[in-house]
Amino acid sequence: MSAGGQVGIVLVSHSAAVASGVAELAKGLAGGGATAPVAAAGGTPDGGLGTSSELITAAAAEVDGGAGVALLVDLGSAVLTVKTLLADGDELPEGARLVDAPFVEGAVAAVVTASAGGDLDAVAAAASEAYGYHKE
Amino acid sequence: MAEQEPGTGLDAAFFTRWLTACAAAVEREAAHLTDLDAAIGDADHGSNLQRGFRAVADTLAKDEPATPGAVLTLAGRQLISTVGGASGPLYGTLLRRTGKALGDAPAVGRAALAEALGQGVAAVAQLGGAKAGDKTMLDALEPAVAGLGQSYADAARAAADAAEATTPLQARKGRASYLGERSIGHQDPGATSAALLIGVLAETAEAGQ
């Protein structure tokens, strides 16, 4: 682990459009140059709404550079599927972690922090702290 | 089958017959489960389980795992990877943890199954964070485990009664919980499918005796 690479970010949503849209937003707001690797795992393989363990494990493998993978999820089966994959032990890369964070704000914080070279703890903390940004 | 020999009786073929019969029962009941889910959820419970149990039946027919534990673990994995809704990781965890608890035993008795299923149900509770009375599959699964300590028929009856008893409850977990008091008056689809699977377990056990 922590071989000097950036933390990878996986965004899991029931909707492919939401997952890829939030990925695009987070990368855009992370600013300028190259960002940490981000992959979207949205919807089911046939394009429907839902959660796909195969899309999640593929996305995690894609962004895994050895520094850990932070998984952000929307709700329901997305949360349960990632927890189940983590409990299983061998389907997600070593250093994969479910991050407790609001999906959109957490994704932005995670990608910004990972792109700046933050380690997995820093990325997870930044994403979770997004719960504290109240809008009123 | 060997109820008089508590260590034996249920082999890999029994668990394969049970889960294959579950696939047929889910096909039969899919529309009903989806109707229940349409009232308080997102109207996909029947079709999700149909996809999952079809995959389970196909895999078990191909792979023919050698022990009860291996059958349940493989079936759990299939549900996790094919269902696409919350029932996938929940039922997948139920079967996988139950299978793990059975270990490598070539055959198990009813008491050992009840013990293992209890561990599976505890894992479901931990994963979903629900407890009895939250209007979820746990409302049927926990009485089923207690009933299985007595007999298969007790397990089936307890699960069916408990599923019906979810109707007046207010949902506190899952998509239905967003409805608040409007979830009252509808039978929970998860408890209903759980009772279906336990009912099929009892039928499979009776057919084998």
Image (cartoon, coloured by chain):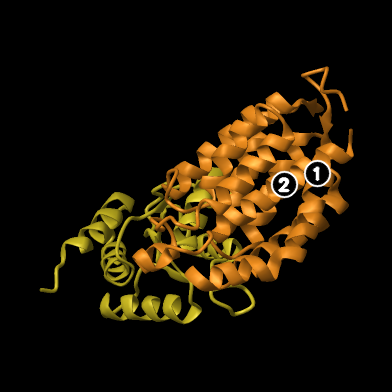
Chain colours: A yellow, B orange
| Whether residue A18 is situated above or below residue B67 in the rendered picture | below
Residue beneath label 2, please?
Answer: B199
Horizontal and vertical percent position of residue B204: 82, 42
Helix, strand or loop at mark 2: helix
Residue at the extreme left: A136
| Whether residue B179 is situated above or below residue B151 in the rendered picture | below
Structural distance between the alpha carbons of marks 2 and 1 = 6 Å
Query: Toward the viewer: B138 or B186?
Result: B186
Give the residue at x 57% y 67%: B36
Q: Chain of mark 2?
A: B
Instruction: Name the mark on residue B203.
Output: 1
Give the residue at x 77% y 62%: B54
Q: Is the C-beta separation of discs 2 and 1 under 8 Å?
A: yes
| Whether residue A60 is situated above or below residue B127 in the rendered picture | below
- Quadrant in which the N terminus of chain B is drawn: top right
Q: Amino acid at mark 1?
A: Glu
**Quarter assignment of residue B203:** top right
Q: Chain of mark 1?
A: B
Describe residue B179's horizontal placement relative to residue A127 as left or right.
right
Describe residue A110's horizontal placement relative to residue A96 as left or right.
left
Helix, strand or loop at mark 1: helix
